[in-house]
Amino acid sequence: MNNHSEICFPFTLSTLPHLERFTVCAKVYLHHTNPYDECDGSVAQGFFSPIPAIIHALKTISPHALKRLTLNFDFRTKCFRPLPPGDVVWDPLVRLVAESKIPSIHFNVVGVVLESDWGERLNAPNIVPPSLADCAALMEYVKGGVLVITPQLPITVEETSLVGELEDLSS
């Protein structure tokens, strides 16, 4: 989404030529526009994540060196509403998977916590997974075995009937 941080931290992986596994653990802050707020909507729905910096870092390593990337994201929000449609929200993650040559990417939703202004914290596990499952591009990578998402999401697979094809072959 357009609110992802585009600031790339100047770190590279080129000094680690034998790196095979790379794990990033991060808190990711979800932001929602309050439709009842009188502000001009300058804070849009989306999240700020390290994904642009990760994409930048992955470009600094040999494309065939890294065998597995693990993203452990712990989400934080102040709004108990589902995220917008998945294709909008998860575009940076789709870009990361599409642009990298890594054979195995694990995306772990470590937790989703609703934080109030007065310090109360509640688990809100149903905010992120439906949006991930709604992203068709991500689900294609999951079906292809390139992307593993935890917790496991329900994937809709189109049913294909082989009965008619088998009958045609036998005639």
Image: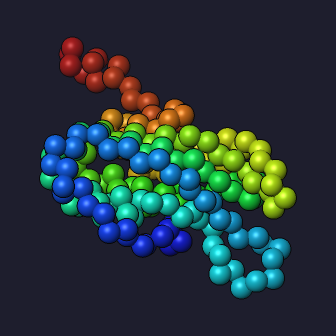
Q: Would you place residue 15 above or below residue 33 in this image? A: above
**In the picture, residue 168 is in which quadrant?**
top left
Frontmost residue, 13 versus 39: 13
- Residue furthest to the bottom in view is 40
Query: Which color scheme is applied?
Result: rainbow
Q: Is residue 10 left or right of residue 48?
A: left
Q: Residue at x 15, y 49 (%)?
A: 17
The answer to whether residue 130 is seen in the rendering is: no
Locate the C terminus and report the quarter of the image it occupies: top left
In the image as oriented, which residue stretches furthest toward the front?
Answer: 15
Residue 90 coordinates in the image, percent (x, y):
48, 57
**127 or 58: which is nearer to us?**
58
* Residue 95 locus on image (x, y percent): 36, 59
- Residue shown at 30%/63% (left/top)? 11
Does the rendering let one see residue 107?
Answer: yes
Residue at the image position 48 percent from the left and 44 percent from the top:
72
Residue 139: quarter of image: top left
Front-lying residue, 139 or 104 = 104
Where residue 136 sits in the image (x, y, percent)? 45, 50
Res. 115 image quadrant = bottom right
Q: Nearer the viewer, residue 76 or 153?
A: 76
Residue 128 at what x, y percent from top left?
Answer: 61, 48
The number of numbered badges drawn on the structure is 0
Q: Image check: 157 left or right of 153? A: left
Q: Is residue 74 left or right of residue 22?
A: right
Identify the residue at image location x=71%, y=71%. 33
